[in-house]
Image (cartoon, grey):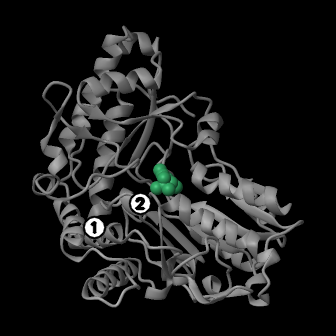
Amino acid sequence: MTQTVSRPAAGAQKPPLPLDVEAIRADFPILTRTVRDGKRLVYLDSGATSQKPRSVLDAERDFYENHNAAPHRGAHQLAEEATGLYEGARARIAEFISAAVEEVVFTRNTTDAINTVAYALSNAATAKEPSFRRYAVGQGDEIVVTEMEHHANLVPWQQLCERTGATLRWLGLTDDGRLDLSDLGTVVNERTRLVAVTQQSNILGTINPLEPIVARAREVGALVLVDGAQSVPHQPVDVATLGADFLVFSGHKMLGPTGVGVLWGRYEVLDALPPFMTGGSMIEVVRMEGSTFMPPPQRFEAGVPMTAQVVGLGAAVDYLQALGMDRVQAHEEALTGYALEQLQAIPGVTVIGPPDTVARGGAISFTVEGIHPHDVGQVLDDLGIAVRVGHHCAWPVVRRYGVPATTRATFYVHTGYDDVDTLVEGVRAAQRFFGVTPEEATA
Ligand code: PLP
């Protein structure tokens, strides 16, 4: 990585923000509390999990207070209402990503969604039903990921390869935090069965060019899974434009509750996959000798689902749609540009990832020369600033850039310039606290 040039960010640009931060903050009860002896909560950890607006909390509470029942079961009014709310949320979430309703499968989170696909591909090899064997992965096949993936989009593929004898291959990274596509044509080849790639890196902030990857996968007949955990909450994502076979994301990172995520799959592909989890709700006919399964999405939703959480995610999608995803993206881009400029003006601070806003989202990882990221995090926490420190579940990335860990700030709809200014002041305070003055840091 190139060391950042140390120059004060005098006259830094603060373009007007597309979202009304004060009005939005009023919707988030948690933002009214203080932390660390009365300090304003500066929440810059939405990339790990987002805070929830009142409408999402109300939707969950209303479900439990007035409609609680198991959907798709029971011949009573509450069961009918619960089913209507659950399926109504599915329809709104499908519309949010321009998908067909029956292509939206509810999972616990992104991790669960990826494991559902990975286990379906290995179960396919031994499926009794011939129509389930179409996408089977076995010996001699290859799975392609990138060096930028969150562990959730890496370890399940390593495990799939161990179960099946397939080989894992990956695309590397450039020094400025982007995907190195120079060997795309050989890494993705006739043996490739699936390419799994993140749309936006949780650690580098990079927004990846999916078009050439999807095009190459199509040339060799491979499936494509896009990890949208950090993109769907922050930019408009439309599965038709994406051109992939699967898109996965987590409700808790997009203002929704924990415990609910989405696996979107092209219907034709989902329909050819065997289930991963089996049990109630996903069966067609059960006999002692064997069972048959429902079509998607029910085939992949075994057991009583996370109903209140799905309803809450529906409310989160309503909230985001009311703001407008174009504006959400523009808002974060303005903040990111300002924060990059301010942070990179601090001597000793190095941004790990693209240094500007070109094809980049609002996750900024950085190191501070002479101070361990955990110590930076502790000083920031004392000031009421919540950031994440560590390897951010993307260990190969920190290894690639030769750092033990990073400090990461992530932005969302309630983030304002004041939050960024507080962060920048906090980093300078950490330098003072540890006696690493700007002059010493650059000496
Ligand atoms: N993929 C990316 C890019 C992420 O940032 C995360 C979480 O931070 C995940 C996957 C895993 O998400 P979850 O823990 O909600 O399953």
> Based on the displayed image, in which of its 4 quarters is residue 418 positioned?
top left
Which structural element holds mark 2? loop
Q: Residues within 10 Å of mark 2 (few under 14, many from 20)?
A: many
Q: Could you tell me residue 91's position as x and y percent?
A: 36, 84
Residue sitting at x 57%, y 43%: 394
Residue at the outermost front position: 288
Q: CA distance from mark 2 to mark 1?
A: 14 Å
Residue sitting at x 75%, y 72%: 123
428 displayed left or right of 402: left
Q: State the count of labels.
A: 2
237 displayed left or right of 130: left
Residue at numbered disc 2:
259
Q: Earlier in the sequence, mark 2 or mark 1?
A: 2
Which structural element holds mark 1? helix
User: Decide: marks 2, 1 in contact (CB < 8 A)?
Assistant: no
Q: Could you tell me residue 413's position as x and y percent?
A: 25, 56
Amino acid type, callout 2: Gly
Residue at numbered disc 1:
316
Decide: is 62 above or below 418: below
Residue 182 seen: no
Q: Residues within 10 Å of mark 1 (few under 14, many from 20)?
A: many
Decide: is 146 above or below 300: above
- As rendered, which of 62 and 214 lies closer to the eye? 62
